[in-house]
Image (cartoon, grey):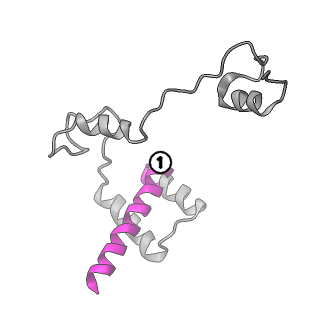
Amino acid sequence: MEKGLFSVEWLAQSSRGGGARDMPGESPLQDPPSVPADSSRQREAAGRSPGHEAGSESAAPGRSRTKFSAAQLQELERSFREQRYIGAGEKRRLAAVLNLSQSQIKTWFQNRRMKFKRQTQDAR
């Protein structure tokens, strides 16, 4: 059976990366090799020892953990007490005042909300 232009087979091939520019019948449809979904996790875990932690020296190079000063923490905590969810304007203001990036402010607030949630659950 010939694969016609815009046939189901041809469309399936083009949507899988066979390329819409390929004409039907020029190259046979090849399925990609099957890879188990968790193979990357298994490879990742194989390189780790049981006590491996993200902050160890053998970790991949990247951004190091931010050490907030006491003044920065005081201002961040004060802002958190006023409002648990930070708005864009307040995030920009804090970033400028504390000499931190907006991303660091956002992450601090996310982490602080999780800490607050754990504390309130433990108190029950």
Q: Which residue extends farthest front? A: 1
Find disc 1 in the rendering and name its residue: 101
* Range of magenta residues: 97-124
85 or 121: nearer the eye? 121
Question: Considering the image in quadrants, where does the C terminus appear?
Answer: bottom left
Question: Considering the image in quadrants, where does the N terminus appear?
Answer: top right
Quarter occupied by residue 30: top right
The amino acid type of the residue labelled 1 equals Ser
In the depicted structure, whether residue 116 falls above or below residue 76: below
Rendered location of residue 53, percent (x, y): 21, 46
Image check: 103 left or right of 9?
left
Tell me which residue sits at (36%, 58%) in the image.
Answer: 72
Tell me which residue sits at (29%, 60%) in the image.
Answer: 70
Rendered location of residue 82, percent (x, y): 47, 76
In the depicted structure, whether residue 76 falls above or below residue 15: below
Tell me which residue sits at (70%, 27%) in the image.
Answer: 13
Rendered location of residue 6, percent (x, y): 83, 29
Rendered location of residue 91, percent (x, y): 53, 59
